[in-house]
Amino acid sequence: MFLPLFSTILAEAVMRKSDWDEARALLELSLDQVDRWGEAFYHAETLRVRGDLELFSTPESLSNPEDWYNQAIAFAQEQEARLWELRAATYLARLWQGQGKTKEAHDLLAPVYDWFTEGFDTADLKDAKALLAELAT
């Protein structure tokens, strides 16, 4: 129980040490558990972290981080998990910002951020607000 959650959190920790192979194995374990047992409450976040892994690991990454972020957003929307949707949209918007896709990044993130009516002192909402301010300039 909670293996996808713990595997994803541990994957993020080992990513900080640049242990890409271990992080990939942990995320594969998490994704396998979702497929096998349907324990999907943390799945959107696992997909987002997998996007991070592809973004930061090696230039020869096997997949595109954008694909993983989009999967995370879509899954979060299916679950109506607004926090996970916001987090994944923020990461994808930041990626697009770095690629010069400022308008697309803003258009992706703004409606997700605007859905929230409280919790503006949380790290995720502060991060999204700061990124939206950068994208507006």
Image (spheres, rainbow, N blue to C red):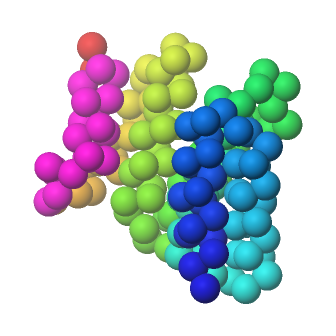
Residue 53 horizontal side relative to residue 97, left or right: right
Residue 87: image location, x then y, percent: 42, 49
Q: Is residue 85 above or below residue 15?
A: below
Res. 31 visible in picture = yes
The span shown in magenta is 118-135
Report the residue at 25% width, 30% height from top. Answer: 130
Report the residue at 34% width, 22% height from top. Answer: 135
* Residue 84 found in image quarter: bottom left
Q: Is residue 6 above or below residue 103?
A: below
Residue 109: image location, x then y, percent: 38, 40
Residue 112 horizontal side relative to residue 1, left or right: left
Circle count: 0
Q: Main secondary structure of the magenta part?
A: helix
Residue 116 horizontal side relative to residue 51, left or right: left
Which residue is at the front of the view, 57 or 90?
Answer: 57
* Residue 21 found in image quarter: top right
Res. 43 visible in picture = no
Quadrant where the N terminus lies?
bottom right
Quadrant where the C terminus lies?
top left
**The magenta stretch spans residue 120:** yes
**The magenta stretch spans residue 121:** yes
Report the residue at 54% width, 27% height from top. Answer: 95
Which residue is at the front of the view, 133 or 48?
Answer: 48
Residue 114: image location, x then y, percent: 25, 49
